[in-house]
Amino acid sequence: MSEANEKLKSEFNEWAADGRGEEMENHHAGIAEPVFVRMALQSGERVLDLGCGAGWATRKLARAVEGGPGMAVGHDISDEMIGRARAASTAVDNVLFTIGAADEIPWRDEYFDKVLSIESFYYYPDPSSVLRELLRALAPGGSLYILINLYRENPYSLRWVKELKVPVQVHSEGEYAELLRAAGFVNVAVDHIPDPTPTPDDYSGKWFANAEELRDFKRIGALLLTARKPPAE
Ligand SMILES: C[S@@+](CC[C@H](N)C(=O)[O-])C[C@H]1O[C@@H](n2cnc3c(N)ncnc32)[C@H](O)[C@@H]1O
């Protein structure tokens, strides 16, 4: 594993030990729900949750594809996150978790119908190699959904860059779209997903000066990148 990925593994193992894997469901559910709807998951589909953390979204995906070969796989570089994801998923039959870097997905070519990645993509040290790996693992015509809060057009998210203990990639919407096209994806689209969850007036967290800023951050919304692998000839 590269030095950059080793660093990510160690940082996210600390997050997992602090219980932050489970907390992320509260932080991300508001922006993830509309994406689950757009994914239009069908019984029998095989879906990958890339950078799955403690696996809350992977379990949701698994329930949505139940039936026949339908299964959800969560993949993450942090073995501590995956340990927690496995422990919390014993009641779900059609879910599996694997440990590793995003550009080393241990599944055969063209296995997955759909891939989702929530709040993880900007950590990947080499996003193009991850996109090539996803193109390999997706079935022809399969679709990709990348949801991220940290991107150039969201000024509040740029504050995180110097506070996080690991390097992150900061790209604009246009740069992301270009990365996807350059990797070989088609039907590349960029959208914003506002976070509809209410913000209490007495907000006193670390990342925003006040509740008004947090509301504005939620109004700007997360960046949703969608794309398809070209269909078979
Ligand atoms: C902010 S968390 C989001 C987790 C989850 N998607 C969620 O919404 O709860 C980012 C996740 O990406 C994973 N991650 C970061 N860099 C990675 C890499 N290079 N390869 C695979 N996973 C990575 C981390 O271990 C962490 O679990």
Image (cartoon, rainbow, N blue to C red):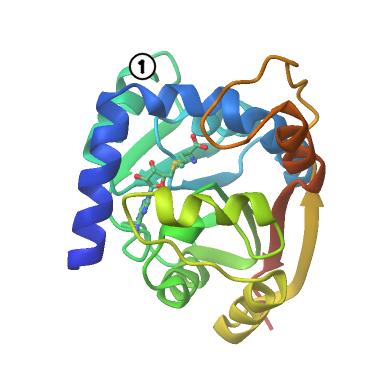
Residue at the image position 71 percent from the left and 61 percent from the top = 226
Q: Secondary structure at mark 1?
A: loop
How many other residues sit within 10 Å of disc 1, few (<14), some (14-19) or many (≥20)? few
Q: How many marks?
A: 1
Q: Which residue is most to the front?
A: 209
Is 182 on the left or on the right of 30, as rendered? left
The C terminus - image quarter: bottom right
Q: Is residue 120 visible?
A: yes
The verdict on label 1 being within 8 Å of ligand 1 is no
The N terminus - image quarter: bottom left
Residue at the image position 42 percent from the left and 41 percent from the top = 74
Is 196 on the left or on the right of 146, as rendered? right
The residue that label 1 is drawn on is 90
Q: Residue 157's spot in the image, x, y percent?
A: 60, 51
Q: Residue 190's spot in the image, x, y percent?
A: 77, 64
Residue at the image position 36 percent from the left and 68 percent from the top = 125
Q: Is residue 66 visible?
A: no
Quarter of the image holding residue 101? bottom left
- Please state which of residues 177 and 171 is positioned toward the viewer in this rendering: 171
Is 228 on the left or on the right of 130, as rendered? right
What amino acid is labelled 1 in the image? Thr
Q: Residue 178's spot in the image, x, y percent?
A: 66, 81
Q: Residue 69's spot in the image, x, y percent?
A: 52, 39
Residue at the image position 78 percent from the left and 32 percent from the top = 212
Q: With respect to residue 97, does 140 lie above or below? A: below
Q: With respect to residue 100, does 78 lie above or below? A: above
